[in-house]
Amino acid sequence: MRNRDLAFWLFLTPVLLGLGLVVIVPLLYGTIYSFTDWNGLTANKFIGFEHYINLFQDKGFLNSIWFTIKFSVVTIFLLNFFGMGLALLVTRKLKSANFLRTIFFMPNLIGGLILGFIWQFIFVSVFDDAGQLLGIESLQGWLSTTGTGFWGLVILTVWQMSGYIMIIYIAYLQNIPNELIESSKIDGANSFQRFRSIIFPLVAPAFTVSMFLTLSTSFKMYDQNLSLTGGGPFESTQMVAMNIVRTAFGANEMAYGQAKAVIFFIIVAVISLTQVYYNKKREVDM
């Protein structure tokens, strides 16, 4: 038993060291620097909560938080909806099921920056040409307004990540005993009743996992936002991550940017832990 305990800690030590050096230590140092006038090189004096007071009066930062929240709510719903739908489709007895799984998952393998530029070409050039050809004005001028920029980001994210969320749901759908499905059919349950009473309760843990992943990914998005809209027009589609980066590296206000990052971390942590707790509790009730 002692040897097994020692081996366990030996295998775990590299992970703990990596977590400490890459996550915990920078988080602690960043929090400390947010209370100073740190300029990226030196911190000359302690200024207390000045940065935190200023950021709650920063309209650009508050607008980016609100935009990120709206984006996250819509994206989380659509990703789980399409992820579950694709999982139900490819777990049917189809000859092309494996091929479809590959096709649906492939967009997740494309880098965020490249994907943003690809969809920028589609929205700006392809949509505009199609709008002029068909006489549909709503297809013209995409990404030039806040509304089209918002939905452009949503479409890009859903197209990229739906296949990844599909894989999570597939893992749980394949563990549902066939006897339960067959028994429900014999009892006369239709497809909706089987989904509501059998399938969804049994895949509830997958919903908890996928919701956590989609929530954290949506809040932390930066590269797609940068390459697709660049935060425009007039920073109206700027998400929190981009606002923090531009504050720290664009305006060279490192300590102020770090204060924003700390608040952002707290918001994401509270929302993520709350939804995990609520969904775990809901799993037990089911």
Image (tube, helix red, strand yellow):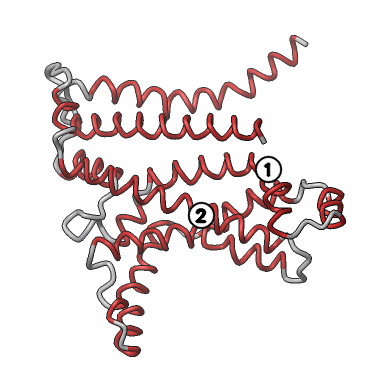
| Mark sitting on residue 220 | none
Q: Examine the rendered structure and indicate whether residue 159 appears above or below residue 95.
A: above
Point 21% across, 45% down: residue: 246
Q: Where residue 81 sits in the image (x, y, percent)?
A: 55, 56
The answer to which of 196 and 135 lies nearer the viewer is: 196
Point 27% across, 81% down: residue: 137
Q: Examine the rendered structure and indicate whether residue 284 appears above or below residue 182.
A: above
Quadrant of the drawing holding the C terminus = top right
Amino acid carrying label 2: it is Leu
Q: Residue most toward the front?
A: 188
Q: Residue most toward the bottom?
A: 133
Point 47% across, 49% down: residue: 76
Secondary structure under badge 1? helix
| Mark sitting on residue 201 | 1
- What residue is shown with label 2? 79
Quadrant of the drawing holding the N terminus = top right
Quadrant assignment, res 8: top right
